[in-house]
Amino acid sequence: MITNRKPTFAMYWAASCGGCEIAVLNTHEKILDVEANFDIAFWPLAMDAKYKDVEAMEDGSILITFFNGGIRNDENEHIAKLLRRKSKILVAFGSCACEGCIPGLANLSPVGEIVYTAFNTITTDNPHEIYPHTAFDVPEGELHIPKLSKILLPLDQVVDVDYYMPGCPPESHQVSAVIDLAIEVIRGLADLPPKGSVIGVGNSTVCDECPRARNVKLIKAFKRIQDIAPVDPTLCILEQGVPCNGPATRSGCNARCPQAGAQCIGCYGPAEGVMDYGARLITAFSSVIDANTPDEIERILDGIPDPTGQVYRFNLAGSLMKGAKSAWIKENS
């Protein structure tokens, strides 16, 4: 019998946009190192593989799985649990798997409203109000489509996760560094980091990577960046009155957005020690407000455009709040 001597690798795409898959492919020739050192057991984007093939594998037979995307439907949940059983190491890969990301903002609405809106917008031609069903009879038999969950969950709220690699998507050079580490580990040249570690990132905040000067200026009002003309290219963007998420966001991206003249939006997730991303950001924003009374502070904070989208754009599903009350109550009823 021919035995497989190379360790196996898998990657799966759940509730996400697919950018994490592109980030892996954007490692260019580094992807050849993956092929040279691993047998790819399951990667729907790159190969033809069926769920039944994974189900037939021995438990623990996959060395490492990159799982990108949150858990939004029963198919996502089934595959997450399946790959957890089959994988020795399960990595929450990208912001969606780590903290919910943009799809997690749908947790602000009950699932029925989400479906109704998707099929009844100005760009949707649905005169007969036809909506998807989880089961449908056709001449060939019964068709099934995944059933949406009431709220989206990050991966670790469904299965045990070994490592976290945030980013929307993770930077390709960081992906390459993690691939190199994995290869060194299987060759016996390095040790795995402690379980639960956040990998492929820095240990500080985006502010610490940002070269812009901070003068501890005090803010009288928050504005959208397009309403400030011109933007000072050398001064901290937050101190110019534009909400910037750098103070609460984990480093590792080299402050790409602030260096390009845009505020940090938080795609690398909470910095080390941040219990709730939104709460930390509101604290940071409040610290630069020039006001002496609670009413004045509240008025200035109320000027933040789209506050929920600002402080929970990537983190709502992974936050202490998880979602709006309307969706949360129906999820648990």
Image (cartoon, rainbow, N blue to C red):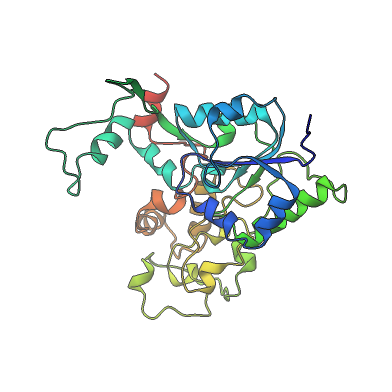
On screen, residue 324 versus residue 127, left or right, reads: right
Q: Which residue is more in the foreground, 77 or 208?
A: 77
Residue at left 38%, top 25%? 329
Instruction: Give the residue at the far right of this rendering.
Output: 188
Q: Hey, which quadrant is residue 296 in on the image?
A: bottom left
Residue at (38% x, 59% y) in the render: 300
Compared to 255, does 307 lie above or below? above
In the picture, the quarter occupied by the C terminus is top left
Q: Position of residue 314 (x, y in %)?
A: 48, 49
In the image, is 109 to the left or to the right of 277? left
Residue 254 rendering spot, x and y as whole percentages: 62, 67
- When asked about the image quadrant of residue 241, the answer is bottom left
Decide which of 121, 36 is in the foreground and name it: 36
Report the side of 89 relative to 115 (left or right): right
Give how far across and how far down residue 109 sits, in percent. Answer: 33, 36
Nearer to me, 233 or 86: 86
- Taking the view exactly as shown, the residue that stands out farthest to the left is 127
